[in-house]
Image (cartoon, rainbow, N blue to C red):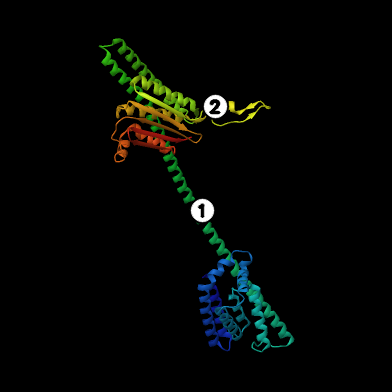
């Protein structure tokens, strides 16, 4: 847009000069008006695209890139041909060498090329007698001087226009840089807000998980110990008048259970502090044996146990010459499972055994522990009666505090659970290790 105004201003000045020097002022005015129309058209439909291309290089500041575009295209457009004809006619009929300055408006050419066309057209017009300079030696010298003035004047105008174009491009780039900087700053602030929000949610989720672990461990360890103690005290109350010695023994057992619940709380806290550690599967089996033995002692129910989990993690290798025996190391360490999983599975066992008696009146149980290096699965079957089924399973799980915690933990760890009521109740929990 700016260069369209500059080009039209140049044509207007030259048209005013033609009124004083041309023999055909009316024709010059018509040619100048037509040239301004074509220049305006070029400005709106061609010049903006070329201006952006020009300013991308040092050479482009003087119109060099435009010359490259013209060279690649290999031909003139209709508007360019029309501009050449109008400019040529105006310069010849202007009656003054100044009329040839009109070629400074040809931004599509290199500066030297536009100046060369103006100078050569001036020489040709003078030789044909269209410009009254003359052909004597002195007049020829004057013609050369005027031609040089035309050449360098067009060059200077074009270079000045190129410098203006370069400055515009720099200003546009600076505005773009500032805009990008503001956008980046806004984006960074938004990212910081999102990061702060994510950190808050992660911290909140971590606290919720920790609270869930604490509630589950306390419920599994303390809750079942106190339940067993209550059942023992009830039995002692019924035996107190008949068998006082047996009743006293039951009361002492209940007292031990209450003391054991305190130790269970301490153990649960230690597990939370060290839940990232591991423990051998043999320790898990021993803990399960202790729970089953106490359960049998308190309830006088029958419990069968099936353990199909290898104590050895791998076969190992033998290297007698170097005194190395990996099998012995594996046998010492055994298959390792997360300590948190072990604590969870022992709590599940207590929950399922207690629920089998409390809600199903079961008298026989089968505890099955299976697994390998990738998974471990605990399954508990009983002969109890229950109305648990597909229709009410979701509601029963949501209602039961212990069962809901079991499902939640398994899903969070990528494991799975199952509860089936078919000729007795069967439940299983499978966890990845």
- Closer to us: 69 or 23: 69
How many numbered markers are drawn? 2
Residue name at image x 59 percent, y 85 percent: 89
Secondary structure beneath dot 2 equals: helix
Q: Position of residue 128 (x, y in %)?
A: 67, 89
Q: Is residue 10 among what the camera can see?
A: yes
> In the visual, does 103 lie left or right of 280?
right
- Closer to us: 329 or 98: 329
According to the image, label 1 marks what residue?
181
Q: Is residue 5 among what the camera can see?
A: no
**Relative to 151, residue 326 above or below:** above
Q: Position of residue 106 (x, y in %)?
A: 59, 75
How many residues crowd around disc 1 within 10 Å: few (fewer than 14), some, or many (20 or more)? few
Residue extending furthest right? 137
**Relative to 174, residue 287 above or below:** above
**Relative to 62, residue 407 above or below:** above
Q: Position of residue 75 (x, y in %)?
A: 60, 77
> In the visual, does 11 lie left or right of 284?
right
Quarter where residue 90 is shown: bottom right
Rounded to the nearest angstrom, the CA distance separating label 1 from label 2 is 58 Å
Residue name at image x 71 percent, y 85 percent: 139
Residue extending furthest left? 241
> In the visual, does 212 lie left or right of 145?
left
According to the image, label 2 marks what residue?
333
Q: Are marks 1 and 2 in contact (CB under 8 Å)?
A: no
Residue name at image x 44 percent, y 24 percent: 287
Residue name at image x 32 percent, y 25 percent: 363
Q: Position of residue 415 (x, y in %)?
A: 43, 38
Secondary structure beneath dot 1 equals: helix
């Amino acid at each position: 847009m700016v260069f369209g105004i500059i080009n039209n201003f140049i044509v207007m000045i030259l048209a005013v000069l033609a009124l004083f020097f041309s023999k055909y002022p009316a024709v010059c005015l018509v040619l100048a008006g037509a040239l301004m129309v074509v220049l305006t058209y070029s400005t709106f439909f061609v010049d903006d695209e070329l201006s952006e291309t020009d300013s991308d290089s040092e050479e482009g500041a003087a119109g060099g890139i435009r010359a490259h575009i013209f060279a690649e295209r290999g031909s003139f457009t209709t508007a360019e041909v029309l501009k050449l004809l109008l400019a040529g006619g105006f310069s010849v009929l202007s009656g003054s060498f100044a009329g040839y300055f009109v070629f400074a408006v040809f931004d599509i050419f290199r500066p030297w090329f536009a100046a060369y066309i103006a100078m050569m057209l001036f020489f040709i017009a003078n030789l044909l007698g269209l410009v009254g300079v003359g052909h004597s030696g002195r007049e020829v010298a004057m013609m050369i001087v005027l031609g040089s003035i035309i050449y360098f004047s067009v060059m200077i105008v074009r270079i000045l226009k190129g410098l203006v174009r370069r400055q515009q491009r720099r200003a546009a780039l600076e505005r773009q840089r500032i805009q990008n900087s503001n956008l980046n700053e806004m984006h960074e602030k938004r990212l910081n807000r999102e990061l702060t929000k994510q950190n808050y949610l992660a911290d909140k989720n971590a606290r919720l998980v920790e609270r869930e672990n604490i509630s589950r461990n306390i419920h599994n360890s303390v809750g079942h110990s106190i339940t067993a103690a209550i059942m023992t005290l009830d039995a002692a109350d019924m035996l107190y008048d008949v068998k006082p010695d047996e009743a006293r023994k039951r009361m002492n057992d209940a007292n031990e259970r209450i003391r054991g619940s305190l130790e269970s709380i301490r153990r649960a806290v230690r597990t939370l502090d060290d839940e990232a550690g591991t423990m051998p599967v043999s320790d898990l089996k021993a803990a399960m044996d202790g729970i089953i033995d106490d359960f049998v002692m308190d309830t006088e129910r029958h419990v069968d146990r099936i353990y199909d989990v290898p104590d050895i993690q791998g076969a190992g290798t033998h290297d007698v010459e170097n005194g190395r025996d990996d099998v012995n190391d594996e046998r010492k360490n055994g298959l390792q499972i997360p300590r948190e999983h072990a604590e969870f599975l022992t709590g599940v066992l207590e929950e399922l055994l207690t629920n089998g008696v409390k809600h199903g009146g079961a008298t026989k149980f089968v505890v099955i522990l299976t697994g390998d290096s990738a998974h471990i699965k605990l399954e508990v079957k009983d002969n109890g009666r229950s109305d648990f089924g597909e229709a009410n399973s979701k509601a029963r799980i949501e209602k039961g505090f212990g069962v809901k915690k079991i499902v939640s933990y398994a899903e969070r760890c990528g494991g799975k659970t199952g509860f089936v009521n078919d000729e007795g109740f069967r439940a299983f929990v499978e966890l990845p290790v």
